[in-house]
Amino acid sequence: MSSQVRTGVVDLDTASATRSATQDHHEKFLRNAGLLAIGDKYMDGYAVARVLGVEMDDE
């Protein structure tokens, strides 16, 4: 990774694809996707990509 700072943060409160009816659903989704260890609201987008197996440029 280069020395530049990355700002790949995902705010799950505003990401409509991950909106849940309740906090329990929200946490269950993150746990089942293997993402809860990264965070429950603000998440490093590159860390999420690694967990989900999404290839990113200049990681």
Image: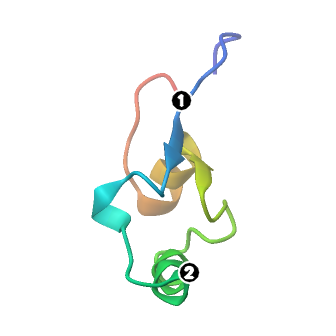
- Left or right: where does residue 1 sit relative to residue 59? right
Which of the image's four quarters has the N terminus? top right
Tell me which amino acid carries mark 2: Glu
Residue at (60, 50) in percent of width and height: 43
Tell me which amino acid carries mark 1: Glu
Residue lying farthest to the front in this orientation: 21
Q: Secondary structure at mark 2?
A: helix
Q: How many marks?
A: 2
- Left or right: where does residue 3 sit relative to residue 52? right
Q: Which residue is under mark 1? A: 59
- Left or right: where does residue 45 sit relative to residue 54? right
> Tag 1 or tag 2, which sits nearer the N-term?
2
Query: Which x, y percent locates residue 2?
Result: 64, 13
Query: Which x, y percent locates residue 17?
Result: 28, 62
Query: Which x, y percent locates residue 52?
Result: 43, 61
Q: Could you say which is closer to the camera, residue 38 or residue 27? A: 27
Q: Give residue 27's quadrant in the image.
A: bottom right
Q: Secondary structure at mark 1?
A: loop
Q: Which residue is under mark 2? A: 27
Task: State whether residue 4 is above or below residue 50.
Answer: above
Residue at (54, 89) in percent of width and height: 24
How far apart, in angstroms, are the residues tagged by discs 2 and 1? Answer: 27 Å
Residue at (47, 57) in percent of width and height: 13
Image disc number at residue 10: none
Q: Nearer the viewer, mark 2 or mark 1?
A: 2
Q: Residues within 10 Å of mark 2 (few under 14, many from 20)?
A: some
Residue 23 appears in the picture as rendered: yes
Task: State whether residue 12 is above or below residue 34.
Answer: above
Q: Are marks 2 and 1 in contact (CB under 8 Å)?
A: no
